[in-house]
């Protein structure tokens, strides 16, 4: 299969054999799995000329115009067109299969149904060697050592399309990632986090501007804390507040702790009142206490509920799976009275009161308990979660096992919590 580097700069001749210029670039519209070459950009003595790719015939060592250059009509590139060399070579793209940002060293082309198409991006060493004419020599050297040069081709349909800044001059044309198209949005949030951590600040903002709110919130929770704060600081206030509303309250509170007081107050003010109340409550606790690491998302059942009513309540609220590890039982004032498992609830007779099947001996901690003690208790008793109460034993929240895992992991892995592993 030919590569862009192998045909770029080829001579362009007229039907009579006169050389009139060289192939400077090829343009496509990035639609479909393998976009077809539609235009050729020629470098001629009188300047750049854009012609239809169909006005050229490929021959060995050169390209031949079907008509004389002066009678070949000029073509216009539409705004959405990509010039392969200018807009893609040496630029970063998202490999949505490997979930990473990579650099394009060459572009693989192929004749498909009589049309030249863009079929892959070469992101390996071969691409660089090929462009400087050293691929063959490098292959021979590797062969003498009993090795083979690895190939680094990513099929184009696994590449996130790019958008060129067409209003910029050709020499300074910028490229940015268009986020998201369906492929990037379907990646695991931890993979999206890995990708945005390799991007520039402007590209990261583009990601979180365009992802749907739920995906943006899940991805932001997986980003390193310092970068989280930078992203939320740079995002428009309304967008940042909307994303914070979708985050787990404890994650949102942790993030807000890293912002300036002014920015924190602005965002909390813009958040939904109920979500803001949960976050503000968490912000009142020291960061290194049980209250500071707990989440206010939990399932609390009134003690007078029957098993049937409790199941109806779960069916109506549709809590996250991790919130159903333990179901807490509270009185009319919200004081913690007991705990039961989902299994206990399901196997109980429908008319049984939850207070009759709960375990009243609940291990719990005060909100002021140091987080290290919380971690030790969860590890010692092999718990999935530990309820947090105030001085009046009112249930405030719960510390889950993934919060404890985050405390014990190295900082570089802090956001790769048990929650993301279990999803």
Image (cartoon, grey):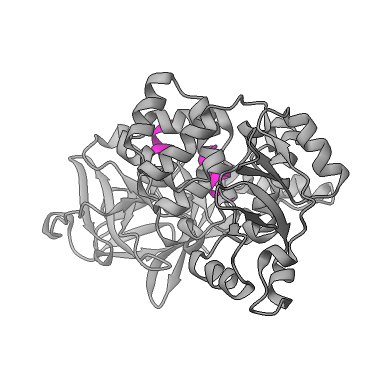
User: What is the x, y in percent for residue 3?
Assistant: 49, 56
User: What is the x, y in percent for residue 180?
Assistant: 40, 53
Residue 193 lies in the magenta-colored region: yes
Hey, which quadrant is residue 388 in on the image?
Answer: top right
Residue 405 is left or right of residue 11, and the answer is: right
Hey, which quadrant is residue 133 in on the image?
Answer: top right
88 up-or-down from 56: above or below: above
User: What is the x, y in percent for residue 204?
Assistant: 44, 38
User: Which quadrant of the rendered structure holds the C terminus?
Assistant: bottom right
Return the residue found at the far top.
261
**Residue at the location (49% across, 69% down)?**
316
Hey, which quadrant is residue 353 in on the image?
Answer: bottom right
**Residue at the location (82% across, 39% down)?**
377
**Residue at the location (76% across, 54% down)?**
360
Residues 102 and 209: in front is 209
Residues 283 and 182: in front is 283
State which region is magenta.
191-205
Residue 330 lies in the magenta-colored region: no
Residue 20 in sight: no
């Amino acid at each position: 299969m030919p590569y862009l580097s192998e045909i770029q700069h080829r001579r362009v001749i007229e039907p009579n054999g006169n050389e009139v210029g060289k192939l400077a670039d090829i343009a496509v519209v990035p639609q479909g799995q393998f976009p077809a070459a539609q235009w050729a950009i020629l470098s001629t003595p009188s300047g750049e000329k854009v012609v239809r790719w169909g006005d050229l015939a490929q021959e060995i060592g050169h390209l031949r115009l079907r008509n004389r250059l002066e009678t070949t009509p000029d073509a216009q590139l539409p705004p959405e067109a990509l010039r392969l060399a200018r807009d893609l070579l040496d630029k970063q793209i998202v490999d949505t299969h490997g979930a990473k940002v990579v650099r394009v060293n060459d572009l693989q082309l192929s004749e498909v149904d009589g049309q030249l198409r863009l079929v892959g991006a070469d992101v390996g060493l071969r691409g660089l060697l090929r462009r400087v004419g050293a691929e063959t020599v490098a292959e021979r050297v590797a062969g003498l050592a009993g090795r083979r040069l690895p190939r680094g081709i990513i099929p184009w349909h696994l590449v996130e399309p790019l958008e060129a800044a067409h209003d910029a001059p050709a020499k300074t044309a910028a490229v940015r990632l268009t986020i998201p198209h369906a492929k990037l949005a379907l990646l695991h949030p931890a993979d999206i986090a890995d990708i945005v951590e390799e991007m520039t600040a402007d590209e990261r903002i583009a990601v979180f501007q365009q992802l749907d709110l739920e995906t943006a919130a899940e991805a932001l929770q997986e980003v390193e804390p310092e970068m989280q704060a930078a992203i939320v600081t740079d995002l428009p206030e309304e967008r940042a507040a909307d994303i914070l509303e979708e985050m787990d309250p404890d994650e949102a509170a942790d993030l807000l702790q890293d912002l300036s007081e002014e920015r924190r107050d602005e965002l909390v003010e813009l958040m939904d009142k109920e979500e803001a109340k949960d976050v503000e409550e968490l912000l009142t606790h020291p960061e290194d206490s049980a209250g500071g690491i707990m989440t206010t998302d939990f399932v609390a059942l009134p003690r007078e509920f029957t098993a049937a009513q409790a199941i109806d309540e779960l069916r109506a609220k549709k809590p996250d799976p991790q919130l159903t590890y333990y179901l807490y039982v509270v009185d009319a004032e919200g004081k913690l009275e007991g705990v039961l498992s989902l299994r206990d609830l399901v196997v109980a007779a429908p008319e049984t009161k939850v207070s009759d099947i709960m375990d009243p001996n609940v291990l719990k901690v005060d909100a002021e308990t140091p987080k290290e003690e919380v971690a030790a208790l969860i590890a010692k008793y092999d718990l999935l979660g530990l309820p947090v109460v105030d001085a009046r034993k009112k249930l405030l929240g719960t510390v889950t096992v993934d919060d404890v895992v985050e405390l014990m992991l190295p900082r570089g892995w802090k956001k790769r919590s048990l929650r993301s592993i279990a999803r």
